[in-house]
Amino acid sequence: MQILDGNIVSQHLRKQIQEEVAQRKAHGKKIPHLAAILVGSDGASMTYVAAKEKDCHEVGFHSTVLRFDASIAEEALIEEVEKINNNAKIDGLIVQLPLPKHINEKRITETISWKKDVDGFHPMNVGLMFKGLPCFLPATPFGIIKLLEHYHIDTTGMHCVVIGRSDIVGKPMSALMLQKNCTVTVCHSKTKDLASFTRNADIVIAALGKPEFLTGDTIKAGAIVVDVGITRVADATKKSGFALKGDAHYESCAAKASWITPVPGGVGPMTRIALLLNTLHAVKS
Ligand code: NAD
């Protein structure tokens, strides 16, 4: 079994981005600038935005975080998004989700100019992705593709089972694996006898958010396991009081798989780097 190491690959890509930014600086070209909108004070959202800001600084991007009180009205937030859409200094915009309940998330994400939509959530980018045309790909599926490419894994003709059909992971992942010449099966919460699909899969991409759901006895020998899940599970032996668990039971799957992503250190760092790749793409397009 070999590890699909998201820490190593993301570090490698980070260096490449740093070098490209340094080149742009040296040639007087525009430095990529990512803006993030953060509404309210949800702990997880604040942590994610801080990590994105840190990632930007590390590679030499400019980064701006616009913070708004949780009570901001939907119309006022729309105006803020439009201001950024019209601000030529900013190349990419993300709105950290979830938003407070009184704000329509769909309306906000669809207000972001698709040319600055580095999260790849705008219907225009979704449509371009399904057609295989240049666009901003959602960060997690994009990161997984970069990880497989780094290890020269040719998925042509493989049967890929994606577990989960969310708009941000499962659905786009299935479209990208189809473009990678896989035969794709998408399983979800209503799938009957899910193990009958995973046992026949050459590659399983687990994105359902149920810790240790995929076990070694439900995959075939030599399968590739990509574990997207990250769930905090109470663990008294840890100082933090919790452990991060993936959607795959690591020990039993690793014993049978040909390749596997660890959690943490697999898909997570690749998701972060994919946002930077999209922002770099934004400044060039
Ligand atoms: P989601 O809750 O939006 O979607 C979960 C999907 O799993 C749904 O489509 C549902 O049908 C399916 N599902 C739920 N229970 C199931 C079951 N018992 N059997 C089969 N399918 C089932 O979640 P999401 O946003 O797609 O994220 C999935 C997981 O990936 C979460 O743990 C999330 O934290 C993690 N995640 C990690 C990263 C990363 O960077 N590593 C990025 C995004 C999401």
Image: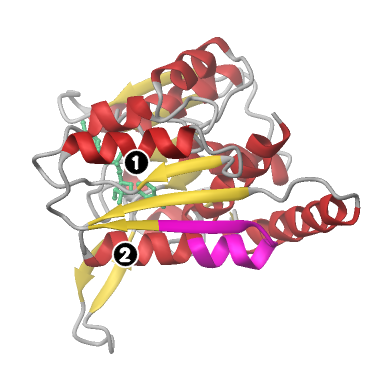
**Residue 50 visible in the current orientation:** yes
Whichever of callouts 2 and 1 sits on the residue coming sooner in the sequence is: 2
Q: Is residue 83 above or below residue 107?
A: below
Q: Amino acid at mark 2?
A: Met
Task: Please identify the quadrant where the N terminus is shown.
Answer: bottom right
Which of the two residues, 143 or 201, is positioned nearer the viewer here? 143
Within 8 Å: ligand 1 and the Cβ of disc 1? no
Where residue 35 appears, as percent x and y from the top left, is 48, 50
- Residue at point 20% right, 24% down? 191
The residue at which mark 2 appears reads as 46
Secondary element at tag 1? helix
Query: How would you rate the neighbour count of disc 2 (Cα within 10 Å): few for under 14, some for 14-19, many for 20 or more?
Result: some
Q: Quadrant of ligand 1?
A: top left
Which of the two residues, 159 or 86, is positioned nearer the viewer here? 86
Report the number of numbered marks: 2
**Residue 221 visible in the current orientation:** no
The residue at which mark 1 appears reads as 80
Where residue 118 appears, as percent x and y from the top left, is 51, 37
Would you say residue 56 sits in the magenta stretch?
A: yes
Q: Which residues are magenta?
A: 53-65
Q: In the figure, residue 163 lies in which quadrant?
A: top left
| Residue most extreme to the left | 102
Would you say residue 217 sits in the magenta stretch?
A: no
- Residue at point 61% right, 44% down? 89
On screen, residue 110 versus residue 154, left or right, reads left
Which of the two residues, 114 or 277, is positioned nearer the viewer here? 114
Q: Amino acid at mark 1?
A: Glu
| Residue most extreme to the top | 131
Where residue 18 appears, as percent x and y from the top left, is 75, 59
| Residue most extreme to the right | 27
Where residue 158 appears, as percent x and y from the top left, is 56, 24
